[in-house]
Image (cartoon, helix red, strand yellow):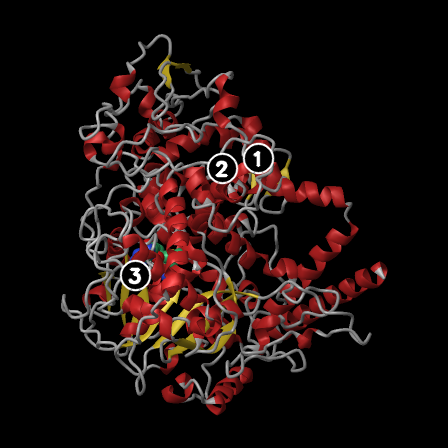
């Protein structure tokens, strides 16, 4: 049977290869005229000149020409396209899609191309504009490639000794580490300049100021994984993969100005840098965040050990380095990455203070006199109410962002954030001159406990509660899902701030800019063909229609769409810092779009009501936004959009761009009476166009997994990235259907580019399900005190998604129909009722200082969000008022007593987390 599987996999590979080769052969058919070839494609370039940086740079990287796949001709009308019930128009659309999507049974459509076209070589840098490279995204080719990847990986795992498979999986962490080093030290820029003959490790070492032997081993690991080419011993060159990490600038340029490294077409490099830096580090803490009891006691372990040695930068050795020293000073991350730890003189840290709230170490280092601890660390007196550690830590940060709460909120972590608490300026020889030591000194170790509780201080600890020491005992009761409030990201960065707040923290400027660019670099998920673009509703929108790109980042998607659909108008909404970066970037890249008013940035918090626009939005675009949030938060975003959506004629359409995860099950062998792949259920998905292609990927057949296994791994990597960073997730289609339905949206169409699980989900407004309603209304039920129902610590968390309370995170009903939604299963209704009863019970008990003007405790979903909702209409909000609310559920007296007790339990748990009560 195993041989049968192996042979079947081999056959899949052979078939797929045959298909690809046929397409390439057809594409190189001499039937097309020379002029056609000239006009449509660049000659595949494999010359040394392709390595060299071009002397004059365009302001915008040229958009690779697309294969000549025409826009669908049988174009449905807008009404037909968006109609939730119009199956005929949907089919019409599908037909039009199919006309341009050749299937296995249809011979591939000839594409005009150079004769003798070969598949792109792994050993040469990738040229995305070449015909051979472009053909890889042709749907048939992309699908065949997926089958090859799935089968080859499955075959490898079958034949490889299991121990080695485990070794491979468990030590794979070195791959992102080495990639990060490669990217952060700008070796791709060096290798690009070196050309196809490559560059010796000694020359690289000289340039990047690291040790040869270390570099060569790092690069060899990458070469072993086909990411790089070891052309001859210790001489490395870019190949098809690593060439994508080229920012488009020269080594000297990026060294002189690392903060602008990704500004001109470095999206992929930015994306890889993001993945291999903060996201990779977060992933290392996945288990610590989920199984805190398994974490050994860090403080005890370290108590007898030598503390961490820390290095300072070396003096420049070469003119090049001299030129990038100032840049290094500007840019601490670069400094970090370029400072070889093995060469720097050690610093001794000696334990000096019993104060565990701050560092337990002071520094001594010969010959420099050791600065006193007080000159390095923020001072904290111990008297409450003055600059006690707690009051200092809890001092509300000033946040002028119009999208944040109007009243300043305390730092959720209770870590000093005000300017007064900043570390003193660094001197060249100060130990605090490196981020590492500063972090070490300014933040207590994870297992340090904070000061004792003082009245009025919302927290006992300046750092988040961390996993209790491991005592060898397995916890008595299994962990409940909400017991781990911190994400792995929070643990890895020693912060309880959300990823977004952290990105905007002083010192993280390069990471913030990099994140924006990285999102642009992620467009490869979507497929590059015209038909992929046309899977969106954009071709069907009327001239002048408004697209609101919600959480649109620096506008990468909008830029692509604005170029492709010149009659549409766009608003890109995001956080203030991101909008600022976006505008700056557009000013240099395409100012005409801003000047003409076709595109504008708008600071907006998507948890609050949509601001009025000049015309009703035709489309709300949410690209890779929902996956950043647990269900309760994603639902909130969707509800705000639903509230602002136009219904009926000219209705607003929601477009969600996200990975859609199929299940990983395999079908059974064809023809053996077993379950076929086609049997994968699509129950409850009737009326959703395109759904049948989603559960089982095209071409999946025994013994492949229905999701094409390794070929789809990217989506599952992203899923875990969302979990460790945000407590978010990529979603299956049933999860997406339930999520959108719970916020008054009905999915009518889904599609996916071949070779990617990234989906385009189109939804239209439908009546809101009952329990969701009050959370967005202008008049939530009152609980008497109204404004300050929640513990300040809880309300102060901003939109940090780390406290996913009351089980709302993963408990959406599966496939609840629109109009029924969460209410249908009774889950939300029950939870909301419980919350209401708890709040009513608690009203008689305790009171807290309020930080919010008006929360939305009514449905329990705003907990942890600290969101403040403005009344519709009070600030010029033109959103039409919602219909009257359904009556609130009235708890029975006995139920109230029981639930109030239960609520107190919950409250205690939450408060303990914030250190408010013992
Ligand atoms: C994963 S990025 C996606 C960016 C963009 N949609 C794209 O595809 O390039 C998520 C975006 O959500 C933004 N964001 C996070 N919290 C937000 C909030 N409360 N209001 C508005 N935007 C927010 C982030 O700043 C970030 O730009």
Q: Quadrant of residue 26?
A: bottom right
Disc 3 residue lies near ligand 1 with CB under 8 A? yes
Residues under numbered marks 1 and 2 in contact, where contact means CB atoms less than 8 Å apart: yes
- Between disc 3 and disc 2, the foreground one is 3
Picture quarter with ligand 1 = bottom left
Question: Residue 161: image x %, image y %?
Answer: 78, 45
Q: Quadrant of residue 384?
A: top left
The residue beneath circle 3 is 607
Percent position of residue 123, x then y: 61, 50
Q: Which residue is mark 1?
A: 218
Quadrant showing the C terminus: top left
Instruction: Kindly report the distance in space between the C-alpha atoms of the residues bearing marks 3 and 2.
Output: 37 Å
Packing grade of label 3 (10 A; few <14, some 14-19, many >=20) is: many
Closer to the camera in the image, 234 or 539: 539
**Distance of label 1 from label 3 (alpha carbons):** 44 Å
Q: Is residue 36 left or right of residue 110?
A: left
Q: Is residue 636 left or right of residue 394?
A: right
| Residue on which disc 2 sits | 181
């Amino acid at each position: 049977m195993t041989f049968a599987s192996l042979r079947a996999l081999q056959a899949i590979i052979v078939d797929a290869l045959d298909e690809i080769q046929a397409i390439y052969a057809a594409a190189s058919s001499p039937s097309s005229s020379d002029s056609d070839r000239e006009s449509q494609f660049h000659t595949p370039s494999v010359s040394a000149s392709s390595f060299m940086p071009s002397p004059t740079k365009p302001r915008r990287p040229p958009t690779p020409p697309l294969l000549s796949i025409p826009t669908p001709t049988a174009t449905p009308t807008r009404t037909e396209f968006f109609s939730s019930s119009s199956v005929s128009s949907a089919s019409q659309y599908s037909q039009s899609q199919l006309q341009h999507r050749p299937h296995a049974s249809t011979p591939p459509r000839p594409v005009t191309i150079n004769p003798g076209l070969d598949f792109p070589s792994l050993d040469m840098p990738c040229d995305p504009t070449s015909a051979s490279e472009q053909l890889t995204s042709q749907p048939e080719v992309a699908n065949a490639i997926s089958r090859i990847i799935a089968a080859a990986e499955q075959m490898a795992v079958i034949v490889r000794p299991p121990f080695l498979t485990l070794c491979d999986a468990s030590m794979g962490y070195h791959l992102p580490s080495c990639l990060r080093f490669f990217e952060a030290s700008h070796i791709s820029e060096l290798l690009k300049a070196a050309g196809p003959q490559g560059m010796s490790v000694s020359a690289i070492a000289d340039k990047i100021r690291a040790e040869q032997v270390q570099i060569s081993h790092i690069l060899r690991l990458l070469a072993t994984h086909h990411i790089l080419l070891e052309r001859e011993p210790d001489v490395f060159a870019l190949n098809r993969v690593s060439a994508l990490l080229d920012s488009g600038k020269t080594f000297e340029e990026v060294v002189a100005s690392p903060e602008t490294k990704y500004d001109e077409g470095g999206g992929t490099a930015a994306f890889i840098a993001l993945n291999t830096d903060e996201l990779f580090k977060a992933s290392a803490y996945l288990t610590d965040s989920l199984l805190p009891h398994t974490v050994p006691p860090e403080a005890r372990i370290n108590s007898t050990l030598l503390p961490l040695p820390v290095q300072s930068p070396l003096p420049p050795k070469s003119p090049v380095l001299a030129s990038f020293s100032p840049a290094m000073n500007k840019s601490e991350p670069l400094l970090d990455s370029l400072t070889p730890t093995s060469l720097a003189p050690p610093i001794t840290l000696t334990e000096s203070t019993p104060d565990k709230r701050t560092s337990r170490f002071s520094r001594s280092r010969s010959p420099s006199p050791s600065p006193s601890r007080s000159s390095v660390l923020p001072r904290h007196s111990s008297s409450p109410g003055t600059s006690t550690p707690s009051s200092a830590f809890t001092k509300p940060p000033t946040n002028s962002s119009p999208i944040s709460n109007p009243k300043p909120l305390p730092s959720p972590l209770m870590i000093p954030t005000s300017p007064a608490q900043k570390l003193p300026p660094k001197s060249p020889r100060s130990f605090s001159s490196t981020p590492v030591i500063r972090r070490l000194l300014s933040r207590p170790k994870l297992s340090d406990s904070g000061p004792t509780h003082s009245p009025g201080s919302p927290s006992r600890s300046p750092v988040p509660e961390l996993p209790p020491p491991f005592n060898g005992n397995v916890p008595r009761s299994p962990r409940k899902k909400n017991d781990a409030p911190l994400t792995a990201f929070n643990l890895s960065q020693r912060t309880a701030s959300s990823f977004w707040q952290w990105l905007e923290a002083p010192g993280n400027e390069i990471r913030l800019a990099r994140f924006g660019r990285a999102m642009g670099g992620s467009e490869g998920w979507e497929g590059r063909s015209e038909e992929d673009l046309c899977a969106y509703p954009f071709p069907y929108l009327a001239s002048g229609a408004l697209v609101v790109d919600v959480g649109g980042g620096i506008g990468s998607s909008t830029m692509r769409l604005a170029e492709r659909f010149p009659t549409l108008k766009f608003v890109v909404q995001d956080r203030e810092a991101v909008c600022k970066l976006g505008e700056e970037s557009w000013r240099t890249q395409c100012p005409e779009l801003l000047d003409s008013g076709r595109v504008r940035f708008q600071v907006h918090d998507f948890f609050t009501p949509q601001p009025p626009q000049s015309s009703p939005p035709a489309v709300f675009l949410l690209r890779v936004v929902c996956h950043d949030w647990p269900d309760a938060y994603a639902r909130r975003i969707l509800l705000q959009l639903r509230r602002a959506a136009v219904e009926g004629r000219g209705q607003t359409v929601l477009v969600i761009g996200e990975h859609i995860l199929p299940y990983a099950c395999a079908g059974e062998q064809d023809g053996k009476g077993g379950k076929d792949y086609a049997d994968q259920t699509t129950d409850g998905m009737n009326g959703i166009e395109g759904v049948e292609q989603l559960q089982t990927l095209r071409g999946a057949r025994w013994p492949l997994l229905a999701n094409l296994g390794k070929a789809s791994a990217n989506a599952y990597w992203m899923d875990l990235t969302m979990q460790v960073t945000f407590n978010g997730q990529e979603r299956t289609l049933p999860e997406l259907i339930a999520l959108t339905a719970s916020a008054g949206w009905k999915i009518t169409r889904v599609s996916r580019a071949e070779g990617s699980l990234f989906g385009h989900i189109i939804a239209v407004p439908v009546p809101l399900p009952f329990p969701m309603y009050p959370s967005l209304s202008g008049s939530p039920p009152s609980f008497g005190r109204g404004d300050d129902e929640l513990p300040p610590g809880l309300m102060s968390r901003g939109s940090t998604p780390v406290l996913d309370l009351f089980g709302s995170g993963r408990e959406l009903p599966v496939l609840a129909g629109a109009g029924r939604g969460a209410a249908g299963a009774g889950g939300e209704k029950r939870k909301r009722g419980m919350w209401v009863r708890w709040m009513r019970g608690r009203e008689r008990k305790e009171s807290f200082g309020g930080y919010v003007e008006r929360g939305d405790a009514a449905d329990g979903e705003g907990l942890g969000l600290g969101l403040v909702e403005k009344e519709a209409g009070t600030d010029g909000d033109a959103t039409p008022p919602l219909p009257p609310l359904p009556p609130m559920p009235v708890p029975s007296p006995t139920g109230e007593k029981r639930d109030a007790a239960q609520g107190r339990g919950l409250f205690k748990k939450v408060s303990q987390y914030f250190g408010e009560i013992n």
